[in-house]
Structures are given as C-alpha cells and as structure tokens.
Amino acid sequence: MMKIQRLFTLSVIVLFAATGCRNRDGFTAEESRLIHSGCSEEIMRLCTVEDREDSLLLRKVSRPLPESAFFSEEYGLLVGCMLATVRNPENEGVGIAAPQVGILRRIVAVQRFDKQGEPFEVFVNPEIIRYSAEQQSGEEGCLSLPDVSGCVSRAKQVTLRYLDGRTFEKREEVIDGFTAVIVQHEIDHLDGRLFTDLLLPDENNRNTVPEAQNVDK
C-alpha cells in the first residue's frame, strides 16, 4: 500500500512540475488539514453510518474538484490514501469515494474488472451521461455500512464522462458488467445516496453478507 501511495503521489508531482501549475487554493483549509492528518498512516478513517456525524456527511452532495486543485500536494496525498484505504487487507473493497474518507469532493477510485490486471483507476468529476435500458440485479455491500448487504438493480451499461485521475484529460467511455455497477455505486456516494436507498422489494431488512463479491466490500 505504501508503494501505491508513493507511486501515485510521485506521478502527480512530476506532472505538477511539468505543467508549472502552482495553484494551492483548490482545497479548503479544513480539507487540507484532514487530508494531511488522515494520511499520517496512509489508511484514512472511513466514515460509516454507525457514527451520527459521519452519517449526516454521507448524505451530502459533493462539490466538483476545481482546476486549482489539480496536481496539488493535497490531491496526490488524498488519492494515494484513498487507494491505500480501499485496498486495506483487513477491510478490502473494490471502490471508494472521497466522501467516505470525509472529503466532499467528486473523486472516486474504481477497480476495473473489465481490464487486464484489474487495476484501480481514479475518476475526477465523473458524470454518467447515459444508462442502458437493460438492468442487472446483484448483491451490494459498502465500506461505510459495515455488515450490511442487499440486492440492488442497476443499469448493465453506462457511459461515463470524467477527468483522468492522473493527467486530468477529459475522457468518455462505455463501461459494462460488474465494473459498471461499481461506478454507479461510487457516483451515488458523490450525490449523498447509499445503496440501501435502492434495495429491491423484501430486501429492506437484509443484513447478511452474501457469498458473492460485493461492491465496496
């Protein structure tokens, strides 16, 4: 996990130097404090519904990441720590959104099961611009809702528009299958929604952990 954070942070610093970008006002003072203090041991504290303040934060809508925050030290630290947190062997997931670590910015990390090597990719200011009519149902869980799972119906395919988390280049691509489910789940976090808002009928009281792989957890 240390290697993941250092490699990502190094790549951001290199790009920062190459572009000559020196804006430092993209994150608020409180966000900067949280990022630096939360990353002292790389894995950040997860916000969960078990804590009242966390629960209220998870219901808020996140703000876009401004251009002034691109290539900043805070951005590199935040994403490196998000990746370390979601890949924590003691509580591993397949996706994470910035609000889950207390930062209300539109940043998500998603494991790309649709690509060779199943890498994690970071999407900045992501937007789903098209949902397929065809749906798929499956069990979901969430790092922010410990020991809770349930069946949710999602679009089988989505068209995603976003900024590349390393280069900040604009991209648009079609994503389907399980990766599309993860994308929808994480972007829901950016809009203050949890998967429990979408549980299929008769699933509202389900809290068992399924054998199938969950989203987030």
Image: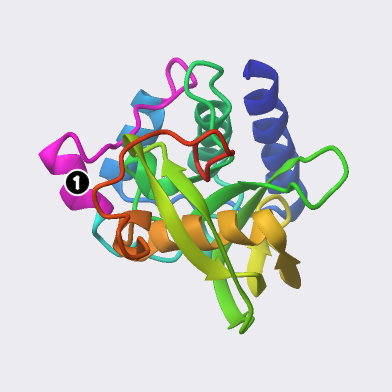
Mark 1 Cα shell of 10 Å, populated few (<14), some (14-19), many (≥20):
some
- Region in magenta: 39-58
Q: Position of residue 217 (x, y in %)?
A: 49, 35
Residue at the outermost front position = 202
Amino acid type, mark 1: Ser
Q: Is residue 75 above or below residue 10?
A: below
Q: Is residue 106 visible?
A: no
Q: Is residue 107 left or right of residue 16?
A: left
Q: In which quarter of the view is residue 183 placed?
A: bottom right
Q: Quadrant of residue 181?
A: bottom right
Q: Which residue is mark 1?
A: 55
The secondary structure type at the circle numbered 1 is helix
Q: Nearer the viewer, residue 125 or 132?
A: 132
Residue that sits furthest to the right in the current view: 116
Q: Is 84 one of the magenta-colored residues?
A: no
Q: Is residue 177 above or below residue 100?
A: below
Q: Is residue 64 above or below residue 103?
A: below
Q: Is residue 14 visible to us here?
A: yes
Q: Is residue 71 left or right of residue 58?
A: right
Horizontally, residue 191 falls left or right of residue 177, namely: left
**Which of the two residues, 68 or 39, is positioned nearer the viewer here?**
39
Residue 47 magenta: yes
- Asked if 29 appears above or below 38 in the picture, the reply is below
Seen at 61% across and 57% down, the residue is 123
Q: Specify whether 79 is left or right of 15.
A: left
Q: How many marks?
A: 1
Name the residue located 49 percent from the left edge and 21 percent from the top edge.
42
Q: Residue 142, image x and y in percent?
A: 41, 42
Image coords of residue 76 (percent x, y): 58, 39
